[in-house]
């Protein structure tokens, strides 16, 4: 059984039926991720009405200008809420001013700590500031660098904070050599796999809409890189997701 540790369902044309397609492919756990108030609420609604689905509430750095107060009320009293995020810094697009991104990220780190939830981090071209904020605000003991896009240097820095690294279909891309090195370096007990659906479909589906049903392809790519059996990666990433999101053992 596989766990997709990070997907966006429902989103655009990716609806709840994608969960059934994924289950047919052996994916039975899903963490669907909030990026703003509307998407966070949709994630919570999906988790409340579907077995094997958990949700996060977060404000993506692209939307940081909206303010954390737009998502914070959604955190209270949610039985299947497992994390805050995705949140962090994105200096590639700068859709929100960097000052607003840093403020929103720090506020969500504190929110995760206050509620005893995991933290899902998005960072792009902002490694130093990301680590500075995590150090200054106090990274939760259960922190995930989602869709990890760094190399060995960044992986070591993230692991030194006690974080987990989650790898997406990017590990199958030809130009992702450093990310593949990070996937080999990462201790297996702190390694997760994800789709980030509907984005970043793995080869041979690259360029098409992604879906949680493709997470076994990501896992198989990681297994090949590490010289592990696919079944072992399936089991270890399941256990890692169980630990970092504090899911009940064996629960689907």
Image: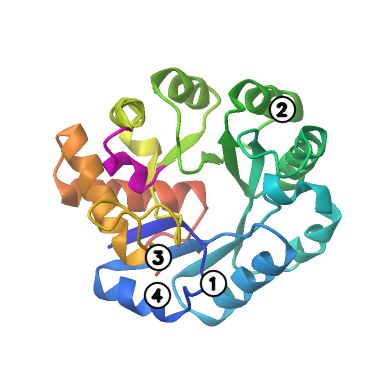
Please report whichever mark, 4 or 1, sits nearer to the chain's N-terminal start.
Answer: 1
- The residue mark sitting in front, 2 or 1, is 1
Element marked by disc 2: helix
Number of other residues with Cα within 10 Å of mark 2, as a class: few under 14, some 14 to 19, many 20 or more: some
Q: Do the residues bearing badges 4 and 1 touch, measured as CB atoms within 8 Å?
A: no
Residue under numbered circle 4: 19
- Single out the residue that lies furthest toward the top: 153
Q: Please tell me the numbered disc located at residue 12.
A: 1
**N-term-proximal mark, 1 vs 3:** 1
Q: Nearer the viewer, mark 1 or mark 3?
A: 1
Q: Residue at x 55, y 73 (%)?
A: 47
Give the crowd class for mark 1: few <14, some 14-19, many >=20 residues within 10 Å.
few
Q: CA distance from mark 2 to mark 4?
A: 35 Å
Q: Is residue 19 left or right of residue 8?
A: left
Which image quarter holds the C terminus? bottom left
Q: Is residue 31 magenta?
A: no
Report the magenta residues as a range: 167-175
Q: Which residue is mark 2?
A: 133
What secondary structure is marked by label 3?
strand
Q: From this view, report whether residue 207 is shown above or below residue 97.
A: below
Along the polypeptide, which appears first: circle 2 or circle 1?
A: 1
Residue visible at 36% across and 31% down in the picture: 179
Residue 1 placement (x, y as % from top left): 27, 63
Q: CA distance from mark 2 to mark 1?
A: 32 Å
Secondary structure at numbered mark 4:
helix
Q: CA distance from mark 4 to mark 1?
A: 15 Å
Per the image, the residue denoted by label 3 is: 29
Q: Is residue 239 above or below residue 209?
A: above
Q: Earlier in the sequence, mark 3 or mark 2?
A: 3
């Amino acid at each position: 059984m596989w766990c997709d540790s990070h997907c966006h369902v429902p989103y655009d044309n990716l609806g709840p039926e994608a969960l059934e397609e994924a289950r047919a492919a052996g994916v039975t756990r899903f963490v669907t991720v909030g990026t703003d108030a509307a998407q966070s609420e949709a994630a919570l609604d999906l988790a409340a009405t579907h077995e094997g689905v958990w949700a996060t509430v977060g404000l993506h750095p692209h939307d940081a200008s909206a303010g954390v107060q737009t998502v914070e009320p959604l955190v209270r009293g949610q039985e299947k809420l497992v994390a805050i995020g995705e949140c962090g810094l994105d200096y590639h697009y700068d859709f929100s001013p960097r000052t607003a991104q840093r403020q929103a990220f720090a506020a969500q780190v504190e929110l995760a700590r206050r509620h005893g939830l995991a933290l899902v981090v998005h960072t792009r071209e902002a490694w130093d500031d990301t680590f500075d904020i995590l150090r200054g605000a106090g990274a939760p003991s259960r922190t995930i660098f989602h869709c990890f896009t760094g190399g060995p240097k960044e992986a070591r820095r993230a692991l030194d904070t006690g974080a987990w690294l989650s790898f997406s279909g990017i590990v199958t891309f030809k130009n992702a050599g450093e990310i593949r090195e990070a996937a080999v370096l990462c201790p297996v007990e702190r390694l997760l796999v994800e789709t980030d659906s509907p984005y970043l479909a793995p080869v041979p589906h690259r360029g098409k809409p992604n879906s949680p049903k493709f997470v076994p392809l990501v896992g198989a790519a990681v297994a090949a890189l590490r010289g592990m059996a696919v079944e072992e990666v399936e089991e270890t990433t399941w256990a890692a997701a169980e630990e970092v999101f504090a899911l009940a053992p064996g629960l689907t």
